[in-house]
Amino acid sequence: MDPHKRSATIEIINDTGSVLAVGRYGTDKTGYAEMLTAGRKFQNRVWAVEGSNGIGRHIARRLVHDGETVLDVPAKLSAQVRVFATGNGRKTDPVDAHSVAMAALHSPNLRRVETDPELVMLGMLADRRDELGRARTQTVNRLHRLLLELFPGGAKKFLSAMQARALVATIKPRDPVGKTRRRLTVELIAELEGIDRKIKAADAELRQLVTDRGSTLMDLHGIGPSSAARLLADVGDIHRFRDRNRFASWNGTAPLDASSGEQQRHRLSRAGNRRINRVLHVMAVVQLRHRTTGRAYFDARKSAGKTSMEAMRSLKRQLSNVIFRRMLADQRRREKASPGGHSGTTLDSSVTGLTPHTDPSEKPLPGPANTQANPTPAGVS
């Protein structure tokens, strides 16, 4: 399937790649029912949807809800198939649907789409929390602009609504322009107070949901309720990653091999899940602001000749390992506590006592399969 907001183009092929049917359907109730009927004419069917975490998410979840088996085909994978198949990368909806179908036919390790109501809810609330954060930043920026015009030199950089209100109370302009400016400033302060209340409520709700799910991500230094919710929602089942190197490649913290001949070098990866990469960046920044083992690791890397940016990238790679171990331990504990299992001692996911080293943490490519937690983890807290 090549999905769009209001339409979806499907191509049905058999296990030899022969095209059996092609169709274009609307994504409204009627069009979806027609598409589902067309697909259910074939036994042992599997739906391959391009971008099930993006534009195809709405229709992929509807299919899963209706009991269908759905695979997620990354857009980059289908794009590669399209280029090699046609030779010119010509892009139409039927060509895209054929590329998605062929990519699914010849790719054995595609992720199966599953819907966990708790994770869907966490993702929605994490999105809302991010929106509130952006709205607060925009409001504070507008407030600073007005305060700069009201007070010589403006206000301090990190300004709370209470501090802004106390500052505005000290000035009483007499001219019409000044009075208007002050009124607008008071209105922005009221907006900021409202956003702060919503952020506080959102954080409390996310904290409760993350805790109820049995996650201990918030115990890590630099991971708050919204970051933990984002990790849980976007990662889903941590077992889908063969090892920590696969996880690092997915979140964009694993460097890319750019070696040529005798020159051995790596470059920054700008691929991967950028939202999770941002979570790791915020976690690293928070750790650098305090006396943590993360700060000690960063200083050790700089002492070894790394630049600040290179040391930061190494730290983010280490933090990716820490999060992977923690989520793996949480998942195993959750599985043992589920019906049919029992609670018990979990694998050690402690991340204290950093021993800086670079061998496994800076591998640009995934290594051998290994989902066991390191008995003596060199993590960062």
Image (tube, rainbow, N blue to C red):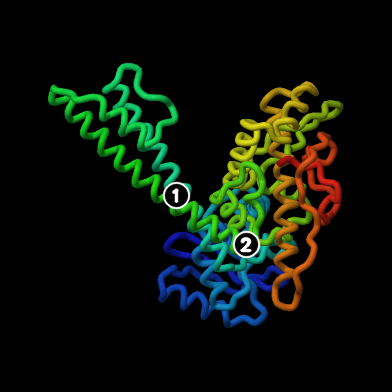
Secondary structure beneath disc 1? helix
- Residue 282 picture quarter: top right
Q: Residues within 10 Å of mark 1 (few under 14, many from 20)?
A: few
Question: What residue is pinned by disc 2?
Answer: 72
Q: Quick one: 255 or 166, which is closer to the camera? A: 166
Q: Quick one: 74 or 97, which is closer to the camera? A: 74
Type of amino acid at the residue the image marks with label 2: Asp
- Left or right position of 199 against 297: left
Do the CB atoms of the residues marked 2 and 1 lie less than 8 Å apart? no
- Per the rendering, the mark at residue 200 is 1
x 73%, y 26%: residue: 299
x 66%, y 66%: residue: 112
Type of amino acid at the residue the image marks with label 1: Lys
**Is there any visible trace of residue 96 in the rendered image?**
no
- Residue 43 picture quarter: bottom right
Looking at the picture, does residue 360 appear above or below residue 297? below
x 74%, y 24%: residue: 302
Secondary structure beneath disc 2? strand
Looking at the picture, does residue 56 appear above or below residue 88? below
